[in-house]
Image: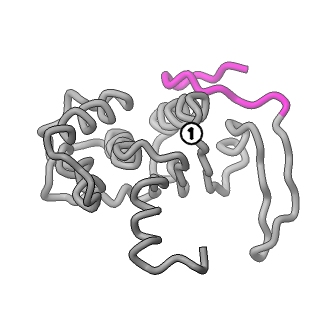
């Protein structure tokens, strides 16, 4: 990574990595469509004719295609996080970094988000989830614990929690 120039790193981040933040980081005066479109605007290879299809597919995958023309400030916290996930998915990244994606959500919305992240992982995406919540971490296949920037444990989860997206858990 040290050998990449800044512009090369930006291209790598845009094409290979999707980011989901605890605070959503949606633009408040723009529509759901425009928020999800944002990563595509930084892709010099993008073709606008395919953008609409990609955006609709990303929103459909998180159950938010019915809100495509809403402004982000008209959405609930759970809806905002699902739009943020759609934005992270629109370039079909190999890796998704999710930083405390359930931290600002009620438990039902949090489980809906965990269901989406688990589905993405099952579809072949690498999902790196950062959390301080043991309960949330139990949804993962593997837990890496860090302390002071150092890896202190690497645990394979034997009986991970499976979120059904309706506020219930399956084992």
- How many marks on residues? 1
From the top left corner, tell me how far across and down residue 14 is, in percent: 39, 59
Residue 156 at what x, y percent from top left? 84, 40
Q: Is residue 159 magenta?
A: yes
Residue drawn at the location 87% of the way across and 64% of the way down: 152
Residue 135, quarter of the rendered image = top right
Query: In the rendered structure, which segment of residues is drawn in magenta?
Result: 158-171
Q: Residue at horizontal 19%, vertical 46%?
A: 47
**Residue 74 seen in the figure:** no
Vertical side of 3 occupied by 45: above or below: above
Q: Which residue is more in the foreground, 8 or 40?
A: 8
Q: If the image is split into quadrants, where does the N terminus sit?
A: bottom right
Give coordinates of residue 51: x percent, y percent. Answer: 21, 42
Q: Residue at x 82, y 37 (%)?
A: 157
Visible residue check, residue 90: yes
The residue shown at (68%, 36%) is: 139
Colouring: one colour
Nearest the eye: 160 or 119? 119
Circle 1 is placed at which residue position?
A: 125
The front one of 165 and 87 is 87
Placement of the C terminus among the 4 image quadrants = top right
Question: Magenta segment: does it hold 82?
Answer: no
Does 164 appear above or below 85? above
Q: Nearer the viewer, residue 100 or 86?
A: 86
- Element assignment for label 1: loop
């Amino acid at each position: 990574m040290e050998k990449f120039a800044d512009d090369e790193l930006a291209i790598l981040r845009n094409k290979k990595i999707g980011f989901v933040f605890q605070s959503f980081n949606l633009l408040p005066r723009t529509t759901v469509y425009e928020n999800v479109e944002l990563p595509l605007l930084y892709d010099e290879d993008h073709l606008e004719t395919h953008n609409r299809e990609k955006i609709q597919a990303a929103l459909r995958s998180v159950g938010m295609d019915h809100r495509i023309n809403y402004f982000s400030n008209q959405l609930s916290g759970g809806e905002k996080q699902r739009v943020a996930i759609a934005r992270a998915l629109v370039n079909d990244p190999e890796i998704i970094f999710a930083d405390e994606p359930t931290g600002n959500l009620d438990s039902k919305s949090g489980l809906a988000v965990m269901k989406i992240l688990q589905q993405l992982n099952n579809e072949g995406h690498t999902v790196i989830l950062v959390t301080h919540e043991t309960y949330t971490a139990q949804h993962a296949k593997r837990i890496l614990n860090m302390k002071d920037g150092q890896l202190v444990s690497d645990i394979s989860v034997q009986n991970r929690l499976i979120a059904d997206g309706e506020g219930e858990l399956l084992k």
